[in-house]
Amino acid sequence: MNVGLVIVSHSSKIAEGVCDLAQQMAPDVNLVAAGGVEDERGISRIGTSFEKVLEAISSADSGAGAVILTDLGSAVMTAEMALEFLDSGNRSRVRLARAALVEGSVAAAVEAQTGADADAVMLAAEAAVVALDPTVLEPFVSHAAAAPGEEPTTPTAKDASVEGEWELPNPMGLHARPAATLARMMSELDAEVTVNGVDAKSVMLLMSLGLGQGKLLAASAAGPDAQQAIDQIGDQVTGGFGELQ
């Protein structure tokens, strides 16, 4: 049983689109769109609906809890109002993330796919910040620089590290779906793993690398499952993440 996600947006199309995107990387996670409002003719227009959000929370929470992500300020207010109407038992399982809608939803979905609890899913959403550089943006790839003064994550385990390097053969390189695949696989192992200097268990950091076809992917792992981590990464990369004809 996985934590569910509620995507609240002023636009029904945005909410549904974010759910579609995140679902590609988290097939077992229940994502529920709560976007827009309906007028008296049943036509969706821009706005947020208290009733929609309340229903979406109930639908998303299958027992493990739910995390709500919102787009703009009034969507936050609508979500907060809905939370006040939950009984104490249901309310204790629901979290409201303060996160960028798209990046946060993707990161939260990947975290929920691993079976993490609501607190961990919320933290994953709130930690997902990716800055886009339109001059080097590739399809389905986000690019980001480390925050000022922030050093790349490196393995800290006492065990000797195991390393590997491969050239990306698939046309889209390390885009969203392969990044999510690697992040999920690495999250299941007892090892500290980096790919090109970033934490391999973070889908957003992997996507931020912007590694296209022909680029070099360098992995380093330390810990009890270090060799398994490198083997799994190597299998995925050399197999083109299942995308080669």
Image (cartoon, helix red, strand yellow):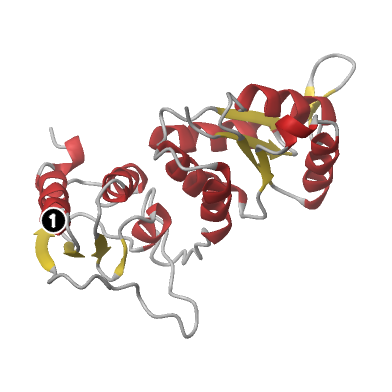
User: 135 above or below 56?
Assistant: below
- Residue 68 location, quadrant: top right
- Percent from the top left, x then y, of residue 207? 37, 56
User: Can residue 169 be spotted in the picture?
Assistant: no
Within-10-Å neighbours for mark 1: few <14, some 14–19, many 20+: many
Drawn side of residue 163 relative to residue 173, left or right: left
User: 235 above or below 58?
Assistant: below
- Percent from the top left, x then y, of residue 36? 76, 31
Q: Which residue is under mark 1?
A: 230
The residue under the point 44% across, 75% down is 146
User: 175 above or below 13?
Assistant: below
User: Can residue 232 be spotted in the picture?
Assistant: yes
The residue sitting at the bottom extreme is 149
- Residue 52 location, quadrant: top right
The residue sitting at the top extreme is 41
The type of residue carrying mark 1 is: Ile
Drawn side of residue 149 relative to residue 172, left or right: right
User: 64 above or below 213?
Assistant: above
